[in-house]
């Protein structure tokens, strides 16, 4: 876990300046996968793994960014800013700076330190945590104050346009808008949301398969294209359908045969996932954990079979959790093809569950997983 005092003194001794400190969390998605860019529903929660950002002004017109994780410093001119990313970790913070400049802000020189304990490439939104931590730090420096949803969109644009990863809005939105001990049902069409308390007796157990996940690489954009192709077929018959959010399972019955088989499968996942996500939020709100767990199991099957977004290891992790004491529901979380499963587990059983799952997974796959008993954390904020 981070130590803000250590981080502050690290920034001070590197840059000889007192930093303002900010924190932005990673997230776990309880349900609603690959629905955000289809203007559908998602239900994430922020987690107690986060990025710290420390910022202080400089007088030399330079932007100097130091990553404690990479032990590396990069220097840029504030004017003109580099127009494009370079495939380097600094694209994430610089993308945000670039987007803010594009909004008409004059960007002065500054020193920025970044330190994250969100596991990288694990489907827990380490990228969004860096973007959001940078955004609120730079926002303070330039005396801007964007409403949360607008800032989330700006961070998403940084990732889409500068980093070149075609993600949706979920990760940036939850990193900014999360509330402690709550999940958040987000309507990705208009960004309206409903908070659903996570009961005290429920723990979020995150199990890392140790298989690397990436949004920028091949499979995520392919799945997105396949599901959008299905949407285009439906739109050919029903012009009101702009996104799969507008489509129904009946549409697939009527026009599914006009789609490539893979597109039909992707669309079946996205359309049914939207229904499950809304139902899961209702179940959580009325405290019906059994129904929530059932929907999570169904969501995993759909993600794995129809969307083909899972991997052997994640399927094994879900299967091995199924009969462990205390499990409410388990599924692969995040962008897919690796990363972590989310297990909702009775709090009293959580540590035993984590140990047993770790032992079972190691035995079965020969891979030692990392398993974390987490809680739903607050959204991004300044640290005093
Ligand atoms: C990644 C993306 F960044 C999100 O926008 C979302 O599409 C998710 O994968 C899949 O639900 O985290």
Image: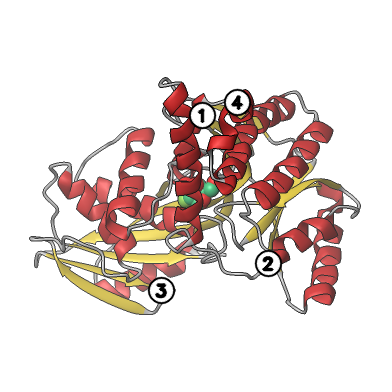
Q: Closer to the N terminus: mark 4 or mark 3?
A: 3
Circle on res. 254: 4
Return the x and y of residue 65 as percentages of the image width and height: 27, 68
**Label 4 C-beta lies within 8 Å of the nearest ligand 1 atom:** no
- As measured in the structure, the alpha-carbon distance from the residue carrying label 1 to the one carrying label 2 is 30 Å
Residue 7: name its quadrant. bottom left
Q: Is residue 194 left or right of residue 97?
A: right
Secondary structure state at the residue bearing disc 1: helix
Mark 1 or mark 2: whose residue is earlier in sequence: 2
Q: Which one is earlier in the sequence, the residue at label 2 or at label 4?
A: 2
- Say which label, 2 or 3, has the lower sequence index: 3
Residue in view at x 59 percent, y 46 percent: 261
Looking at the image, is mark 4 or mark 3 nearer the viewer?
4
Question: Would you say the residues marked 1 and 3 are in contact, meaning their CB atoms lie under 8 Å apart?
Answer: no
**Label 2 SS:** loop
Residue 77 left/right relative to 345: left
Q: Secondary structure at mark 4?
A: helix
Q: CA distance from mark 1 to mark 3?
A: 41 Å
- Ranked by sequence position, the earlier of labels 1 and 3 is 3
Give the crowd class for mark 3: few <14, some 14-19, many >=20 residues within 10 Å: some
Q: Which residue is mark 2?
A: 209
Q: Tag on residue 68?
A: 3
**Residue contact between numbered discs 1 and 4, judged by CB atoms under 8 Å:** no
Relative to 282, residue 112 above or below: below
Disc 1 or disc 2, which is closer to the eye? 1
Q: Nearer the viewer, mark 2 or mark 3?
A: 2
């Amino acid at each position: 876990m981070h130590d803000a005092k250590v981080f502050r003194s690290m920034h001070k001794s590197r840059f000889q300046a007192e930093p303002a400190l900010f924190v932005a969390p990673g997230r776990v998605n309880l349900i609603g996968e690959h629905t955000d860019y289809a203007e559908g529903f998602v239900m994430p929660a922020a987690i107690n793994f986060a990025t710290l950002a420390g910022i202080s002004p400089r007088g030399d017109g330079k932007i100097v960014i130091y990553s404690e994780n990479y032990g590396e410093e990069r220097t840029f001119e504030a004017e003109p800013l580099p127009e494009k990313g370079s495939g380097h970790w600094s694209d994430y913070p610089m993308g945000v700076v670039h987007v803010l400049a594009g909004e008409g802000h004059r960007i002065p020189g500054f020193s920025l330190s970044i330190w994250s304990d969100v596991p990288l490439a694990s489907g827990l939104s380490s990228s969004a945590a860096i973007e959001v931590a940078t955004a609120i730090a730079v926002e303070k420096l330039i005396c801007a104050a964007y409403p949360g949803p607008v800032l989330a969109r700006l961070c998403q644009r940084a990732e889409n346009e500068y980093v070149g990863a075609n993600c949706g809005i979920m990760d940036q939105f939850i990193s900014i808008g999360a509330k402690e001990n709550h999940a958040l049902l987000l309507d990705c069409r208009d960004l309206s949301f409903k908070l659903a308390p996570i009961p005290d007796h429920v723990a979020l157990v995150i199990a890392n398969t140790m298989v690397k996940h990436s949004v920028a690489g091949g499979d995520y954009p392919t799945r997105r294209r396949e599901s959008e192709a299905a949407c285009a077929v439906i739109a050919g018959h029903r012009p009101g359908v702009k996104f799969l959010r507008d489509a129904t399972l009946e549409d697939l019955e009527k026009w599914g045969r006009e789609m490539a088989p893979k597109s039909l499968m992707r669309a079946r996942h996205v359309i049914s996932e939207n229904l499950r996500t809304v139902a899961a939020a209702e179940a959580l709100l009325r405290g019906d954990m059994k129904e929530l767990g059932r929907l999570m199991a169904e969501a995993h099957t759909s993600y794995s079979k129809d969307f083909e977004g899972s991997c052997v290891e994640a399927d094994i992790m879900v299967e091995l959790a199924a009969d462990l004491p205390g499990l409410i529901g388990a599924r692969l979380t995040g962008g897919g093809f690796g990363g972590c499963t989310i297990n909702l587990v009775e709090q009293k059983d959580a540590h035993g569950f984590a140990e047993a799952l770790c032992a079972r997974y190691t035995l079965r796959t020969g891979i030692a997983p990392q398993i974390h008993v987490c809680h739903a954390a607050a959204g991004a904020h300044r640290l005093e």
